[in-house]
Amino acid sequence: MYEQHHHNIRTGPKFATGAGPWHRGRSSDTDTEREFGSRSRTRSERGHMNGRSHSPNATEDVARSAAALEGSLDSAPPISYWSAKRHSSCGNPTPAPPWSAKPISWRHTSSLPTKLKTANAALVLCLNIDVDPPDVVKTSPCAVLECWVDPRSMPSIKALEHIGANLKSQFENLSQKIQYKPILDPSFEDLRKACQQLRKQAKDDAVLFHYNGHGVPKPTSSGELWCFNRTYTQYLPVSLQEIQNWLGSPGVYIWDCSAAGHLLHNFNEFAKRRDEDIKRKHGGQFPEGMLPFAQSLQLAACEAHETLPTCPDLPADMFTSCLTSPIDIAIRHHMLTNKIDLNIDGAAHMPGNLKDRRTPLGELNWIFTAITDTIAWTTFTPEMFARLYRSDLLIASLFRNFLLAERLMKGYNCTPHTSPPLPSTNTHPLWATWDLALDSCIRQLPDLLAANEAQQNYDGQKSPPYQYIPNSFFADQLTAFEVWISRGGSALTRRGPLALPSGTEYEVALTAAQTTPLSPNLAASWSSTPHLVPRKPPTQLPIVLQVLLSQPHRLRALILLSQFVDLGPWAVNLVLTVGIFPYISKLLQAPGPDLRPVLIFIWARILAVDPSIQVDLYNNAQGYKYFSKILTMHPSTSGRDVVQTLPNTSEHLAMCTFILASLARDFSKGQQACWEENVFDACFNLLDEADFLLRQWSCLCIAQMWCGSEQGKMLGVTRGTQDKLVNLMSDDSAEVRCAALYALGTFMGSSGSKVETEGTKGGGGSGGMYDRDERTHFRMEVAVVTGATLVVREDASPMCRKELVVLVSCLVKEWRGYFVVCAWIYWEEERKRRHATVYPYVSANADEVSEQAVREWLDSIPDAGLREESRVLLSSFYTIFVVLLDLSVDPYNEVATQAQTVVDYIMALLLESPFTKLDEASLGSPPLAPINYINPNHPDSRPENRDARSRISSGSQQSSPSLSYPAHPVIAPPSPSASSIRSDAPPVRPSLSRADTMTSTISNTVTSTVKRTSSIANALKNLAGGINFPPMEDTRTASPTPSVYNFHLNGTSHHLNGDALEQMEASRPPSPTFNVAQYASPYSRPVTPTQSDAVYSPYPSSSSRSPSLQEFTQQVHDFRPSDVMEALMEEDMERLRARKRLKRGMNGYTQQYHNNGYGTVPSPSNSTFSVDSAGSSVILGLGTGMGIRDVLPLKSTFFDWCSEYFTEPQMRQAEADEPGSIQYNYQIWRQQRNEQVDNETRSQAEVASDRRWDRTVAHFHGLPHPLNLAFHSYDQHLVASNDTDIITVWDWTRNKRLRSFRNGNPKGTSITSLHIINQNVGGIITTGSADGVVRLYRNYDPLLDPGPVQMVSSFRGLNEIVPMRHGSGVVMDWKQSAGILLVGGDSKAIKTWDAQTEIQGLDMDTASDAPVTSIASDPGSSQIFVAGFGDGWIKVFDRRFEEDEAIVQTHRGHNAWVQNVKPHPTMIYQFLSASVEGEVKLWDLRGRSDQAVTTWNLMQDVGLSAFDVHATAEVVAGSSAITNNRYRSQRLCFQSLAPGHNEPLSQYNVASGLITAPIKINPSPYIPRATSFVFHPTEMLCGVGEGDGTIRIIGCNFA
């Protein structure tokens, strides 16, 4: 057992990593779990007990411990174990449902194809003052103001110039970065020259053309406007086609004249024709970089049949006034319509400055901007909003002010319109808010004007100036936004006024997705939450953007904004779409510490949704430095005592590490910036922090910083980072362990990129390490992977094991020659072992090929120290190879699939290696079958004709004498015996069944001249443990289809009574929710040669290869195995030397090890052959592996999975914890129901020990031999497993089968232990099978989870199974209050697994050669448990002691197999045991004697089949054994434990269902009984399973 590292109990708020279906999940390091959860102690915690002296039987200690239990704490509240997010996704990012809406691109200035940027403007004024046009009849009085100038007040020439200057000034108030050119009463030639000059100056940008035609005739219906001749004696028409020729594209046009609709419509017609001509000239496509004329923007004052307003109180250019001076026209219009008793010209004297928001005029302009932005954002489409309001400042201002023009001018029978057309907004409810703000300001206008006048007429007595009362608009809107977040931010489940209108793109996508076939598990996960109705976004969001400009409201606005983005990615996309990102970027330059927490939170959310922001963060002058300074100035990273300004420091530091990790990912400049800011050193120091999320993201940030960076890896090794990460392999948090593995994976060459391209595929190991010699470099890479492998191989979390496979694949990639050697050694050792098994008395000297090869190879090394080092390194590779074989048949399918990819890559190289050319080669000859080899076609080898209890394994004693493993602190000898076993035998564990399959399949197809053909690919199917190779023409990946799942329920069909449905539904075991791993064949290659073919070989084609190579591989065979070993190893070293010769800097992936990434030199990491510095081929490895597909290293998705955390709500309670939610109400009901059941059954238990137990409750029929039964404590569910691997869930109140599925244990093994955990909050079925594997399943109740049953997790509960003739398989005991799973069985140890941390705790030695047959622990908080053994002994263990001192009592309780041990239902210091002979004994832990307190003989005459003790009632019961003489019926006997009850409560016979004597007394070789019996945990019921499949539910008779 590896050393565990102790971490103190963490304090402070923690982040949760997931939630169960009905209960909020908690991380393994949260305070709640540490307070109420498991108290499993590590070595460090137990260290203070090492000095304790123990008596021989430790009776006094046990007595004190048992007595102390009476004063222990109350039971802990229920915790849902194995319900975190990692248990539903296993580190795979959650795919979005197909109906989810795609986010709109918010990068309007760079990504929109129709973007516009205005360069200059032509302000054309055709007024001809003092001369009215002939087609216009003016009223008297009429509107005369032009740009707020009365032409009658001055000479016409001067008035025209004044008007032009005012118009230019008004446009400059909109945008001062543009050059405006007034063109006053132009002639035709002047207009043409001005337009052409402006287009020349604008280049490819847009030109604004503003046309005021108040002094010329109306535009014609054919699209002509008017100007003058040079003498102003004629009106000259100007066609829009000429305007388009002069101004080109793109352009923005403003038509301020009567009948302006003629210009707009004709412009579009001409633009359409012109665009078609351009496309025709350019082959049907528009020229790149040129916008179509139809994309031009137009704003027209009225329709073609309308005339401009002539109201004398309004300006004549009302449309232009609305567009350029909206506040002035709005005040004037408001005063007119509301008849305010104030001089109409007072609007011109509104005090303040438009740019100063603290003044009345500036505040009004600020409010107007916020309201019009909001109206546009809530009315227009996101694409249109981004194009018009977030592309160009001038365009945004014009279209923002156009909304006001539409509202005002429609009241004067004018209809302003645009191109592209926009929805009407003049009735938007926010206009009422604008009227209120306007009225509030105008009401103060008299006092403001009077105050100004008083200051001008100051006479010596200074009166206090009038204080302007600011408008409460923004404060009110923030309050409304806060109300929306707190009340309306939740999702909608039904359509209503807050939902988006029907017929949206969302519903169209949803309808289309419903017709698409989905994966059952994915569909179930998506359907677990009802389909939500898309709701309207909050209208205040654009207003919040404006509030950020105000210092007084900024902090409140940011806090509300952080709460909004916390709602999910959809909220972040809305924030980005509305244009808030530039403001958030500028705030990074704010020095205020009060903004730091909220800015960190918002930036983390934005980066999690859109990682491309990394470029903006880098380009911002103070962007990434803002976060790096926070990280590096922390005391734990800088060593300086600085004032803490961050609340929840650990959380915000974790966010900073995430932000900086996202900056460095796939972005070499960002990676370099992080190194310059010393982020690596800060993350290194944070690895020791208490908060698990901070440790996790510190690892991930390190991973991204040295990913693809040679210099970064060198600096990391200098600090010993790789060793510190290896130490984190035993961290309490599974997420931290995976993060450390991920960091080591990127260190060893795995890709940390989000997308897989030829430049980011990975490879190259740990780089060049130019500051270290090649031997030190070699040892370091091997030590890193070996250290991680020896620890993580026993990890209970499949997510960790999956990351381990990725790490190992990196080592295999770079040191493939060593692994080929290990594969060959393993093959030869397996062949030798089988030869010794078949012919034990025949000398095997001829078969010692591998030993002699290793010996010769070691002898060829002259230096003794180097020889010992080489032997240790080879043993390390062999250890990793054996673990890799073990992982290739991992019980979790995704782990096995990835490991099979790696193993098959090695095997493919082995079959291509010169080992097949050796004279003594055995790869082409079939090995001898062992004596106990099972031929399924031979009648004598069938299970029913063999000893039912035979447990001899063919691979039990395999070893590798040629690799005698030394005592090394890191490298430990492998345990092939724990895994070398056939999947179709009654084995211990199917870990290395691949070797057996190799022998039986490759020998039939591999000849002495090894060639890779489709027949070999087909022969290698079983080499992948059932994962089929794709055909030769297949693509890279193929869906795994384990052949072990394809067989039907053979042998039991004659017992099913026609229940064929059960066979179909139980055809294969359940899969996890996200089983996304894809198998990659080493043989499949693209049909069409592409540039990527360089991955497979550095040579262009077979014809251009070196002739010496062809001659070598075809003719030369005079070499020894040691020569092949040396050549393969030297090839690996040459690959390392090539890495060291090719120096690169910290440039990310730009020159990484892919596809000739070194210029003209082929990549040494991907090529099968090494190359020297000159580029000439150095043929090593004797031509091994030419053409083998480059499928390594594997790629991890863990970083993306972790990033999802920052897209999930953290400020709100989970739906299951939200009062009023369906899940919350269900859980409350369930809790109340459970309490009611406990109260009712508690009163029943008090009298059950005096009543008969003969009331028939239910009776139903299932599969034969239900050897294990388990009742749910509160639901009416009974789980049964048969003698093979089929699990059936029954509703015993309705006699209805709910589910039936396979467990997946190998053929010939059985499910030997069955439990239901988390019963208070739902339930997870937990099984232990004879192959040593523990599997957990959920969603077994179709009423709550209509989807398929899902595998939650699986792991090897017993890693080392000892072959026994009479074994028990796996025996488990679950302690819900502590989250502890005790696992024993055919092993010399009982293992303690912590459900929270998913790591192994104690590994207690049983000190017995007999198997553990049963384990029982007290349901309270006791650390003591009892185990029964196959030799009749009973031992008491205390988990508080050291592993070798855990046995505190030993009782010679029985003379036969202990069938079961159970705690006393009411006396916590007593327990009961029963043997197969029918003897039941009561023991007292406090007693000093080895004698039992009481003994009963329940089935002394016939033997005991099953025995159980009720959990709350003082009742024990058992069933008689089935024998050849007594098989038609079975006796049930119920005995009371209450004092004075010597006679059984009930004793009667029930029919067994058997008509003839059974062929096998015990259907399973691991379970010494033919029937089953179990009590209900709470109710006064019991279940009896008969051999014919009948299950009876019997209850206590209270009558």
Image (cartoon, rainbow, N blue to C red):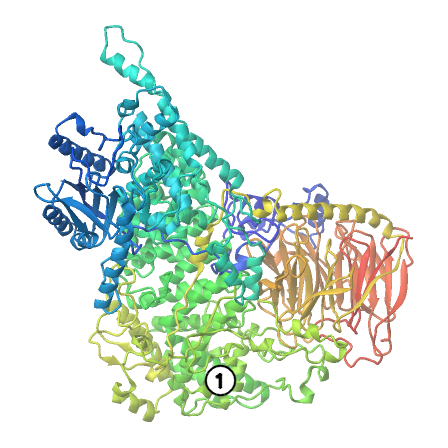
Along the viewing direction, whichever of 422 and 809 lies nearer the viewer: 422
Along the viewing direction, whichever of 1214 and 662 lies nearer the viewer: 1214
Along the viewing direction, whichever of 1443 and 450 lies nearer the viewer: 450
Q: Is residue 642 visible?
A: no
Tally the numbered discs: 1
Task: Please state if 1095 lies on the left or on the right of 1423 as rendered.
Answer: left
Task: Please state if 239 lies on the left or on the right of 686 as rendered.
Answer: left
Spot occupied by residue 1344 in the image (x, y as percentages of width and height): 66, 56
Residue sitting at 75 percent across and 49 percent down? 1468
Spot occupied by residue 1405 in the image (x, y as percentages of width and height): 62, 62
Q: Is residue 366 visible?
A: yes
Spot occupied by residue 46 in the image (x, y as percentages of width and height): 57, 50
Residue kind at label 1, given as amino acid type: Asn
Which quarter of the figure has residue 705? bottom left
Task: Please state if 1053 lies on the left or on the right of 1174 as rendered.
Answer: right
Circle 1 residue = 1018
Which structural element holds mark 1? helix
Task: Please state if 1314 lies on the left or on the right of 766 as rendered.
Answer: right
Q: Residues within 10 Å of mark 1 (few under 14, many from 20)?
A: some
Q: Is residue 1196 above or below residue 601?
A: below
Q: Is residue 349 above or below residue 123?
A: above
Residue sitting at 39 percent across and 28 percent down? 437
Quadrant of the snapshot with the N terminus: bottom right
Along the viewing direction, whichever of 506 and 218 lies nearer the viewer: 218
